Image: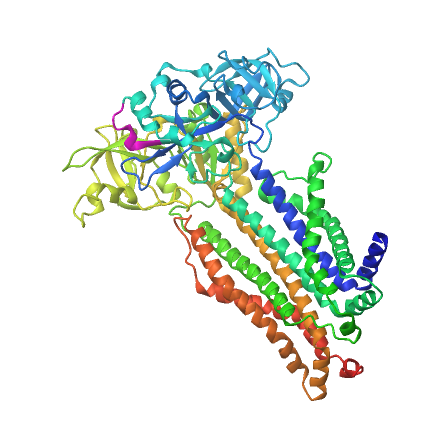
C-alpha cells in the first residue's frame, strides 16, 4: 500500500508540473532560509558553552560628576579579584585578564607579531576549559616569565621543533624573556576570548597595583560555588567596596554587577570598554532573525495549503472514485499527507543545495564560519530530516483533511465546493502571509534608513581620506621625525596624533575645574590627548576661544572642552551666562592649566550614544597611540605607498598597519549593517513566497469561477471587467494585511529606534509607500491568472452545461 501511495504521489506531482514546481520552490526557499538562520542562531548561542564551571565576569556601572549619564563598562580594578575571594566564600576562584594587541615575540632570528596576547593569573586554566595539548594546567602559568602558545602560533614560530622549554623574547616598552611552558589547542571560534598566547601576570607585576582602587584596566572573572545566589551577593558589594577601597564616597561612583560568562557575548551590547568580547552581537537581533526565519517558513507552509486546495477540483473526482470503491477518509488523508512529506523531502534536497550555495555569502556578511557538515555533526542531519517531516505534516494536514472530506455524490456530479468557511480560512492565511511580508518590508525600510542616517550624519569632523596608524612606546618616540618626513610630500595634506581614534569608546579620567567665583569641582570626563594641530586636521569647529598653541611650553597646560561640557560647567550659573566666560578658567589637575577654547559638539562615539562631556588635552609627553595622516584623495595608492616607505625606513622590523577612518566607522556600525541586510533578505524572501501563495489563491479563485466568467463574457463583459472582478478581492486582502501590519510595525520600530541617541522620525509616508508597493506586487502576481481566465474561450467553460 505504501508503495502504491508513493507511486500515486509521484504521478500527481509529475502530472501537475507547474503547481508542483511552485510548491517545491516555495518550500525549498523557506526551508533554506530557516536552515541558514538556524545555523547562525545555534552558532551565536553556542558561545562559551564548552566551559563547564560557573564563571561570571565582573562589571562596573560608573556614575561620575560631569557625565551626561552613567555608563556600564566591562573593566574592573586589579585588587578586586583577590579581595572578592577573600571576602566571600561563594567565590571559589578568580582570574584577571589584560589584553595586548600585536604582541611582538622573537625566537632566535624569527620575529612575529601575534594578534592577541593575554596576561593572566595562574588560575586561568583552572577556571576555563581551553584544551592544553602540552604542559601542566595547574603550574604552566605559576612562575613569572611563563608563556603558553596556541598550536598555530607555535607552528609559525618553531616549525616542527618541540617548543616546550624554549626561550622567546618580547621587545617593547615592557621587554621580557619568556620560557614556553605549554601548547594550547587553537581557540574555538565560538569563544568570546580570542588569543594567540597567554603569559603570567606576575611577569610585569608592580607593587602599586595591589592597592590601585580607581584604576580600571583589566577584566576580572570569578568562579562561583554551585547554587550561589548571585543577586544576593551583589547586594553585599557596596559594603565590600567601602571596606577594601578605604574611600567613603566610592559607592557614589561605582556599582558592581556580575554577568554570566555565557551571557557576555550576547547580553553586553550596552557595556562599553568591552575589549574581550569577540564578535559581540545583540541577542535581540539573534532572536529577531529566528522569529523572521520561522515566519518565512510558516509562509512557505501556508503556500502549500493554498496551492493544494487550488488543485482541489482536479483531485475531487479522484477522491470520489476512491471513496466509491471503498477507500476510507483516513486512508485518503494518509495518502495526501504522504504526498506532502514526499514533496517536503524533495524541497529539502533543493534547500540543502541552496544553503550550500549561499553559506559563503552569509559567512562573508556575518563574519562567521557557519557550515552544514553532517559528517561532523550527524545529529544535525537527523534533526533537519525530522523537522522536514514535521513541516510536511503541518503543511499537508489541512489539505489532507479538506480533500478527504469531499462527498462522492457531490464531486462525481462536478460539485466540489469546500464551503464558505474554507474560503474564509484560505483568505485568513493569505492575509497572515501579507501581514508578515508588509511588516518586514516596513521594518527593512526603517532599518536601512536609520543605518544610512548614521553613516551620512555629519559627525562634526572630517573623516574622509584620513588614515590611522597604530603606535606604541617605541614607534611613538619618533613621531616628530615621521611627521616632518610625511609633510615633506605633496601627497600628504596633514599629520597629527592622539591617544585614541575617533569612533572608539574613549578613556575617562578625573579632572578638576576651578571657577573664578566658586569652589573647586572634581569631575570624571572623557579625555582625548592630542597633538596641537588635531582640531585643524579634523576641521573641528571652535565656538569660543582659540586652538592649541604650538609652543612647547604650552603642553599640558591648555585644554579645549566640548560644548556639552561647557553647558555642564555653567548649569549652576545664571541662565544667560555666555560660553566665552569659561575661557581662561583654571582646569585640569595642574593649577596652571586653563581652558583655552570651546569646541562645537562632535560625535566621537557612534550615534547610538549621546555626545558625552569631554575635553582635548595637548600633552605630547604622555605619548600617542595613533598616528593620523590626511592624504590627497586623488592619489590614494601613491600616498599609501609613500607612507609605507617612510614607516619602513624608520621601523624596518615592525609591520605597517593602517586603516581608513571611514572603514573604522563602518566597523562601528557593522552589527547594524548585518541586521539591515539579513532582515532585508528575509523580507524579500517573505514577499516572494507570499506572492506564490497569492498566485495559488488566484488560481483557485479563477478555477472555481470559470463558469461564472464564461457567463459574464457571453453577456458582454470585457477582459478588463473580468480582471478587475478577480483582482478586487485580492486587493482587499492586501489592504487588510496592511491595516494589521501598520500598528505592529510602528510599535516595533518605535521600540527599536529607542536604542539610538540620534534617530530618524517614524514617517507615515513609509507606511503609505509600503502599502502601494504591496498592492502593486499583488496585482502583478495575480494578473497572470486573471488575464488568463478573462481571455479564455467561454464555450469551453460552458460546454458541460
Q: Nearer the viewer, residue 392 or 81?
A: 392
* Residue 273 position by quadrant: top left
Position in image of residue 48 (x %, y %): 55, 31
Q: Image quadrant for the N terminus?
A: bottom right
Asked if residue 723 is among those painted magenta in the image, a careful observer would answer no
Position in image of residue 641 (x %, y %): 55, 36
Left or right: residue 560 versus residue 718 is left
Vertical side of 503 occupied by 475: above or below: above
Q: Give the residue furthest to the bottom.
A: 715
Asked if residue 249 is among those painted magenta in the image, a careful observer would answer yes
Position in image of residue 583 (x %, y %): 22, 40
Q: Nearer the viewer, residue 455 or 479?
A: 455
Q: Is residue 531 visible?
A: no
Vertical side of 568 occupied by 417: above or below: below
**Residue found 49% across the figure and 16% down from its top:** 122
Vertical side of 636 occupied by 275: above or below: above
Q: Nearer the viewer, residue 574 or 277?
A: 277
* Residue 215 position by quadrant: top left
Q: Is residue 217 visible?
A: yes
Q: Image quadrant for the C terminus?
A: bottom right
Position in image of residue 462 (x %, y %): 41, 46
* Residue 81 position by quadrant: top left
| Tally of numbered discs | 0
**Residue found 46% across the figure and 55% down from its top:** 749
The magenta span reads: 247-255
Amino acid at each position: 500500500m505504501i508503495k502504491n501511495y508513493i507511486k500515486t504521489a509521484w504521478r500527481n506531482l509529475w502530472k501537475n508540473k507547474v503547481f508542483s514546481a511552485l510548491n517545491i520552490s516555495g518550500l525549498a526557499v523557506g526551508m533554506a532560509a530557516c536552515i541558514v538562520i538556524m545555523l547562525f542562531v545555534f552558532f551565536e548561542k553556542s558561545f562559551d558553552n564548552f566551559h563547564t564551571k560557573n564563571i561570571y565576569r565582573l562589571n562596573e556601572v560608573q556614575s561620575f560628576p560631569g557625565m551626561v549619564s552613567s555608563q556600564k563598562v566591562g573593566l574592573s580594578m586589579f585588587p578586586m579579584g583577590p579581595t572578592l575571594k577573600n571576602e566571600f566564600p561563594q567565590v571559589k576562584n578568580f582570574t584577571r585578564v589584560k589584553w595586548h594587541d600585536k604582541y611582538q615575540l622573537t625566537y632566535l632570528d624569527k620575529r612575529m607579531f601575534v594578534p592577541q596576547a593575554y596576561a593572566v593569573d595562574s588560575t586561568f586554566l583552572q577556571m576555563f576549559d581551553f584544551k592544553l595539548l602540552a604542559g601542566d594546567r595547574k603550574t604552566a602559568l605559576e612562575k613569572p616569565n611563563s608563556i603558553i602558545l596556541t598550536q598555530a602560533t607555535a607552528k609559525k614560530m618553531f616549525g616542527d621543533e618541540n617548543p616546550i622549554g624554549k626561550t622567546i623574547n618580547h621587545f617593547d616598552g615592557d621587554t621580557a624573556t619568556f620560557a614556553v611552558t605549554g601548547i594550547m589547542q587553537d581557540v574555538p571560534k565560538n569563544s568570546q576570548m580570542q588569543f594567540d598566547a597567554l603569559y603570567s601576570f606576575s611577569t610585569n607585576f608592580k607593587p602599586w597595583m595591589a592597592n590601585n582602587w580607581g584604576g580600571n584596566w583589566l577584566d576580572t572573572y570569578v568562579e562561583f560555588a554551585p547554587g550561589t545566589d548571585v543577586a544576593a551577593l551583589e547586594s553585599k558589594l557596596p559594603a565590600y567596596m567601602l571596606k577594601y577601597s578605604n574611600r567613603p564616597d566610592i559607592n557614589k561612583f561605582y556599582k558592581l554587577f556580575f554577568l554570566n560568562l555565557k551571557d557576555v557575548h550576547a547580553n553586553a551590547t550596552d557595556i562599553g570598554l568591552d575589549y574581550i568580547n569577540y564578535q559581540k552581537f545583540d541577542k535581540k537581533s539573534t532572536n529577531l532573525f529566528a522569529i523572521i526565519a520561522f515566519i518565512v517558513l510558516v509562509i512557505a507552509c501556508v503556500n502549500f495549503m493554498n496551492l493544494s486546495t487550488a488543485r482541489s477540483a482536479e483531485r475531487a473526482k479522484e477522491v470520489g472514485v476512491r471513496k466509491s470503491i471503498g477507500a476510507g477518509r483516513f486512508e485518503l488523508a494518509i495518502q495526501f499527507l504522504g504526498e506532502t512529506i514526499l514533496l517536503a523531502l524533495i524541497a529539502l534536497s533543493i534547500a540543502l543545495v541552496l544553503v550550500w550555495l549561499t553559506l559563503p555569502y552569509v559567512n562573508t556578511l556575518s563574519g562567521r564560519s557557519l557550515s552544514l557538515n553532517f559528517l561532523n555533526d550527524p545529529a544535525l542531519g537527523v534533526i533537519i530530516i525530522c523537522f522536514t517531516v514535521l513541516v510536511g505534516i503541518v503543511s499537508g494536514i489541512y489539505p489532507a483533511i479538506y480533500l478527504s472530506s469531499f462527498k462522492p455524490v457531490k464531486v462525481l456530479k462536478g460539485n466540489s465546493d469546500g464551503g464558505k468557511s474554507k474560503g474564509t480560512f484560505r483568505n485568513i492565511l493569505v492575509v497572515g502571509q501579507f501581514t508578515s511580508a508588509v511588516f518586514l518590508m516596513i521594518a527593512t525600510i526603517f532599518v536601512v534608513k536609520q543605518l544610512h542616517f548614521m553613516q551620512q550624519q555629519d559627525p562634526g569632523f572630517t573623516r574622509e581620506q584620513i588614515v590611522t596608524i597604530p603606535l606604541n612606546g617605541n614607534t611613538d618616540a619618533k613621531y616628530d621625525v615621521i611627521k616632518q618626513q610625511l609633510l615633506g610630500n605633496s601627497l600628504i595634506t596633514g599629520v597629527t596624533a592622539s591617544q585614541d581614534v575617533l569612533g572608539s569608546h574613549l578613556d575617562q579620567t578625573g579632572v578638576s575645574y576651578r571657577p573664578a567665583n566658586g569652589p573647586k569641582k572634581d569631575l570624571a570626563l572623557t579625555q582625548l590627548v592630542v597633538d596641537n594641530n588635531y582640531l585643524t586636521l579634523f576641521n573641528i569647529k571652535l565656538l569660543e576661544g582659540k586652538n592649541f598653541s604650538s609652543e612647547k611650553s604650552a603642553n599640558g597646560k591648555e585644554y579645549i572642552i566640548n560644548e556639552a561640557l561647557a553647558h555642564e560647567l555653567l548649569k549652576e550659573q545664571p541662565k544667560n551666562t555666555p560660553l566665552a566666560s569659561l575661557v581662561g578658567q583654571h582646569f585640569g589637575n595642574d593649577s596652571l592649566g586653563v581652558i583655552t577654547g570651546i569646541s562645537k559638539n562632535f560625535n566621537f562615539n557612534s550615534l547610538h550614544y549621546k555626545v558625552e562631556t569631554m575635553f582635548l588635552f595637548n600633552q605630547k609627553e604622555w605619548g600617542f597611540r595613533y598616528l593620523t595622516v590626511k592624504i590627497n584623495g586623488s592619489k590614494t595608492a601613491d600616498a599609501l605607498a609613500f607612507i609605507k616607505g617612510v614607516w619602513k625606513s624608520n621601523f624596518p622590523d615592525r609591520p605597517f598597519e593602517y586603516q581608513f577612518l571611514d572603514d573604522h566607522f563602518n566597523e562601528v556600525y557593522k552589527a547594524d549593517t548585518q541586521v539591515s541586510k539579513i532582515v532585508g533578505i528575509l523580507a524579500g524572501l517573505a514577499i516572494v513566497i507570499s506572492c506564490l501563495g497569492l498566485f495559488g489563491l488566484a488560481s483557485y479563485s479563477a478555477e472555481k469561477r470559470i463558469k461564472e466568467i464564461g457567463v459574464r463574457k457571453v453577456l458582454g463583459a470585457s477582459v478588463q471587467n473580468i480582471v478587475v472582478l478577480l483582482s478586487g478581492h485580492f486587493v482587499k486582502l492586501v489592504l487588510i494585511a496592511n491595516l494589521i501590519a501598520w500598528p505592529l510595525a510602528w510599535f516595533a520600530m518605535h521600540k527599536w529606534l529607542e536604542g539610538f541617541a540620534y534617530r530618524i522620525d517614524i514617517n507615515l509616508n513609509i507606511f503609505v509607500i509600503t502599502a502601494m508597493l504591496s498592492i502593486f506586487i499583488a496585482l502583478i502576481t495575480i494578473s497572470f491568472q486573471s488575464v488568463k481566465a478573462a481571455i479564455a474561450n467561454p464555450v469551453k467553460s460552458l460546454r458541460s452545461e
